[in-house]
Image (cartoon, rainbow, N blue to C red):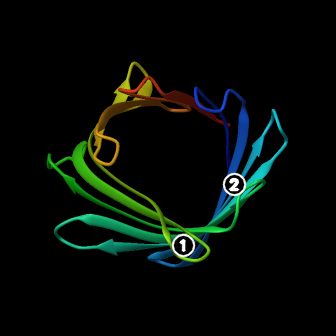
Amino acid sequence: MDTSLRYGSDGKALCIHAKKDFPISSDLLFQVHGIVDTKTGNPTCLARITRDLLSELADTRVGFGVRYGAGEKLAYNVRGRAGRPITSSGMLSLDIKGRYDADKDLTERKTRGAIELTWKILNFKDQDLRLRLGYNISEKVPYFQIRENNWTLNADGNGKWNVRYDL
């Protein structure tokens, strides 16, 4: 089980996040996420089925999820990601991501899309780093991510940020 502590500018509360993957087959995965807001004590649950579609053109992942949280209604989402290495080592890649959220009646709630450039740096001063620059097409805002072995910092052009520590 993967666990992390998360804090961001939008919630102003520390959240405890846990994720467990259950492989169904070599390309199919069932994921369960649980989040507890330490300020309110409210839990949120997410279950998702994800399928990897590997091809010569791109590393592609498609997922369908169901989410339920305290004070929220049941919601569904469909997400997808396609990535293509730019360098032969695969350390520099270009990814395109999209997501569609809908309520229980399947009326549109929100669509999102982004394009990202990711650079992985192995053994940088005894740490593995990942630098990601992206552009959120839906909100028309740039963002970046810096990830070191256990720490992740995300920030965007609107001043939103969050930090995560993987336990």
The image quadrant of residue 70 is bottom right
Per the model, the C-alpha gap separating discs 2 and 1 is 14 Å
- Asked whether, in this view, residue 162 is left or right of residue 53, the answer is right
The image quadrant of residue 11 is top right
Q: Which is more toward the observer, 119 or 127? A: 119
Up-down relation of residue 43 to residue 92 (above or below): below
- Asked whether, in this view, residue 22 is left or right of residue 112, the answer is right
Judged from the image, the secondary structure of the residue bearing numbered disc 1 is: strand
Query: What amino acid is found at the position of numbered circle 2 in the picture?
Result: Met
Q: Kindly identify which numbered label has been placed on residue 1.
A: 2
Q: Earlier in the sequence, mark 2 or mark 1?
A: 2
- Asked whether, in this view, residue 66 is left or right of residue 134, the answer is right
- The quadrant of the image that shows the N terminus is bottom right
User: Dot 1 corresponds to which residue?
Assistant: 29
The residue positioned 79% from the left and 51% from the top of the image is: 43
Residue 36 place in picture, x, y as percent: 77, 45
Q: Of all residues shown, which one is farthest toward the top?
A: 125
Judged from the image, the secondary structure of the residue bearing numbered disc 2 is: loop
Q: Kindly identify which numbered label has been placed on residue 117.
A: none
The residue positioned 59% from the left and 33% from the top of the image is: 164
The residue positioned 83% from the left and 38% from the top of the image is: 40
Q: Residues within 10 Å of mark 2 (few under 14, many from 20)?
A: few
Q: Of all residues shown, which one is farthest toward the right?
A: 41
